[in-house]
Image (spheres, rainbow, N blue to C red):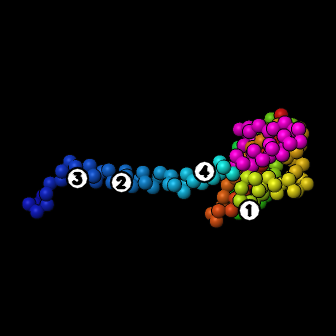
Amino acid sequence: MNSRTPAPTTSRLAALVAAPAVLAALVAAPGPAVAAGAEAQQRYQGAAVRHTNGERTERDLVALKRQKCVQKYAVKQARWMAANETMAHQDLQPILSDCGLRSVGENVAYGYAGGKAVVAAWMDSPGHRANILEPSYRLLGLAARTDDDGTWYVAQVFGRK
């Protein structure tokens, strides 16, 4: 060391060591947009489940119960559709076997701003309406995800043990 360069102090060394850790924490920590996205997903999904069950109970049908196995497949399909920016049905056979179901159905959609709107659209479609009002279904998985442009993609998976 020369006389013009002061010897590093413990506090300067700590700052140099801490700077990368702070930077890493800022990069790794979810920001407000990520948290808002998760909250928006929960609101969308909750509204869609409430309106689906509302349609059923208005007709004296049993309300559907959320179930982890069918939920896994709803999430998988909603994520795939959003990532690929396309709407498509998944192969239902793996759901039957993996979840131990006797019957399974699926509704998919994209472009609806909220859970109430997507259920209203499904109720206006004979095939989707039939799934929502199928008396034998007891289980429900529902997931909503957005693509990079903010378009919603939704998958609703029904099941009967």
**Residues in magenta?**
45-71
Dot 1 crowding, Cα within 10 Å, few <14, some 14–19, many 20+: some
Quadrant of the frame with the N terminus: bottom left
Q: What residue type is labelled 4?
A: Ala
Label 1, secondary structure: give it.
loop
Task: Give the number of the disc on residue 12.
Answer: 3
* Magenta-colored stretch includes residue 56: yes
Q: Can residue 62 be seen in this view?
A: yes
Q: Mark 2 — residue?
A: 20
Q: Which is nearer the eye, 125 or 15?
A: 125
Q: Which amino acid does label 3 sit on?
A: Arg
Dot 2 crowding, Cα within 10 Å, few <14, some 14–19, many 20+: few
Q: Mark 1 — residue?
A: 111
Could you give the CA–CA distance between mark 1 and mark 2, rounded to whole angstroms? Answer: 41 Å
* Magenta-colored stretch includes residue 48: yes
Q: Which residue is drawn at 24% across and 51% down?
A: 13
Could you give the CA–CA distance between mark 3 and mark 4, rounded to whole angstroms? Answer: 39 Å
Could you give the CA–CA distance between mark 4 and mark 1, rounded to whole angstroms? Answer: 18 Å
